[in-house]
Image (cartoon, helix red, strand yellow):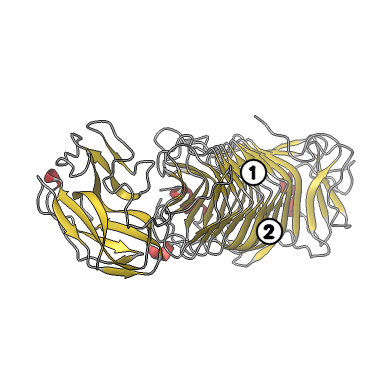
Amino acid sequence: MTLRKIFCMLSCMLTVSACGGETPVPGPNEGNQGGNEGGGESSGPAYYISYSRGSDSNPGTSPDAPWKTLDRINRGTFEPGDRILLKSGDTWNSVTVIDSKFTGTAEKPIVISSYGDGAKPRLTAPTAPAGSSILTINNSDHLVVENLEVSNGTGYGLVMGINDGGTHGDIVMRNIHTADMPYVGIWFNAEHNRNVEIVSCTSEHTMHLFAVSGGTNIDVTDCKAENCHYGGYSIIGVKGGTMKNCKSLYGGQEPAPQGTCGLFLGIVDGYEVVDSEFAYQQRLGTDPDGEGIDFERNNRNVVIRNCHMHDNAGCAIMFFESGGGSEQANDHCTIENCRFENNHRNARSPRGFEIHFSHLDDNNYGVIRNNTFDLPEGVMFVSTADPSVTIEGNKLADGTPLVIAPAYTGSPAVANGGFESPALEYGKYEHRPMGGVWTFRGNSGVARYGSDFNPPPAPEGSQVLFLQGASDVTQWVSLAAGSYKLTCKASYRENSGLGQSMAFYVDGRQVSDMFSPADATAYTAYESNPFTVEEGVRMIEIRSFSEEDKTVFVDDIALVPVQ
C-alpha cells in the first residue's frame, strides 16, 4: 500500500521495522541582493569561500582571500559564533562530507550562509555516483544553514547525519532551495535529532522537500514543495513539533506503485499540522493513493487543523496501518476545522471517501469535527470508522450538516441492504466501489448477475455483495433502544469452492455464530443472535475470514426487531 518502499528507505536507521513496502520557483530572499552576509545569530569571525575567486591556500578570513572548495572546511577548526560564508552567484560541483566540525551554543550558533550580491550559492553534483548526497553534515549542534541552493544531483541534496552514536540538534535550515534530484532535498537521516527548524525552504523535482527519520521537536514553517516525485514532506519517528503555513502542490510526478501523498506520517506522536495546504497530488497509471495526507501507521496524538485539502487525485486523508494489524493502528488523531474541496479527481484505491479508514480500527479514539466539505458526486465525507472515533459538527459548504447515519425514523433499516447502489452495467463487478453508504474493505465489492463472478440470481434486485478472502463491509445505522437481529441471504461462488466463513458484528462485537454458505446455486437465509443496544448510532458489519481465494455472495441484509 501507500509509500511503503519510501517508508522503508527513510526509516532504515530506525529501530522499528517498516511494512515492506510520495517550473522553477524562486525561494524566499532569492538572490540575496544588497550584499547580505548571513548569520544574524552570530558575531564571531567569518570564513569566506568562493569557487570563482578562491584558493584553499588562502587564509579564508576575508572576501579578498577566500577558500575555494567546501572540502577545505574539513581542515579548519570552528568555535561558537563562527560564520562560514559562500559567495553568492558561485557554483560548486562536488560531493562533500563534513564530519563533526560544528558545535555552537544557543547564544552563538555556528552559521553557514552567503555573502555578496547575486543568486544563492549553488551546490551541485550532476556527475556523482548514483545515490550520492551533494552535501552531508554530520554530528552538529547549534548550527544554522541558510541562503543556499542545492540542486542537480544524482541522489540526495542536503543531508544532516549522525554517525557517532549520539544525539544532536538545535539546527535551523532556512531559505534553502532544493531541486532536480531523484531523492530528498533536505534529509535528517538518523533517529536522534532534536530541536530542528526548517524555515522558508522550497523544493521542486525532488522526492520530498523534507524528510526526517526520527527525532524530537521537529518544526517546519513557511515551506513550499512543488512538482515533487512523491510528495512534499515525510515525517517518520518524530515526537513533538509542528508544521505551519506549508504547502505541498502537484506531488506524484513520477510513477509510484506504493502510492503518493502530500504529507506522509509514520510513527509520529504529539505533532500538529496547521494552516497548511495539500493540493493537486497526482496519481499515474494504475498507482494507488494520490491523497493529501497519509497517516501510514502508529501515529498518536497528531492534529490536522485549519488546513485545506483540495484537487487531489485521491482522497484527502487516509488512515492506514501498513497491513500489520492493530499494533500498527493510529489513535487519538484529530482532524478539525479543515476544508475539503474537489478531491477524488483521479481516484483508484482508496476511493469513495474524503477521509478513508483502510482498516476499521485505524484511528482509535480519534476526532473528526467541524470540517467543511465540498463533495464530488458519489463521494462520502468519511468512511465507517471505529465506534470510538468522535465525528461531529461537519458540514457541506452551504452549511448543511453532515451526519454518519440518517436519523431514526421509527423503524430500523439498513440502507442499500440489497447492494443496488452504485448501479453496475449488466455483467460487471467492482471491488470497493465508489458511492453508496457501505464502506468496502479488503477484496469486497459488488457483482451484477452475468458477471465473471457468476453469482446466482440476486434475491433482491440484480446486484449482490461479494466477500472474497478476508474482507468486510460496514455501515452506520440509527437505532432506538431495544433488541434486534441481523439477517441476510448468502451463497458461495462455485468455482472458488466451499470454505468461506463469515459473521455479523455490531459496534465491533460479534453477534452471530460463524456460518459458511453451502449452496452455490441458491441463497440460504442466515441470522445473527439477538443483541441489545441503547439508543444511538451503531456500526453494523459483516466479515469474511478465509485467507484463501474463497468468495461468498450476500444480499438482502436487514435489521429485525426482537420482541
For residue 466, above or below residue 426? below
Between residue 512 and residue 193, name the one nearer to us: 512
How many other residues sit within 10 Å of disc 2, few (<14), some (14-19) or many (≥20)? many
How many other residues sit within 10 Å of disc 1, few (<14), some (14-19) or many (≥20)? many
State the residue position of label 1.
247
For residue 381, above or below residue 170? above
Between residue 281 and residue 203, name the one nearer to us: 281
Spatial CA span between label 2 and label 1: 19 Å
Q: Amino acid at mark 2?
A: Val
Q: Is residue 499 left or right of residue 151?
A: left
Q: Position of residue 334 (x, y in %)?
A: 55, 59
Q: Amino acid at mark 1?
A: Lys
State the residue position of label 2.
196
SS of the residue at dot 1?
strand
Q: Are marks 2 and 1 in contact (CB under 8 Å)?
A: no
Q: Residue at x 27, y 31 (%)?
A: 425
Q: Position of residue 278 (x, y in %)?
A: 59, 43
Pair 2/1: label in front: 1
Residue 138 is at least partly visible in this image = no
Q: Is residue 358 left or right of residue 369?
A: left
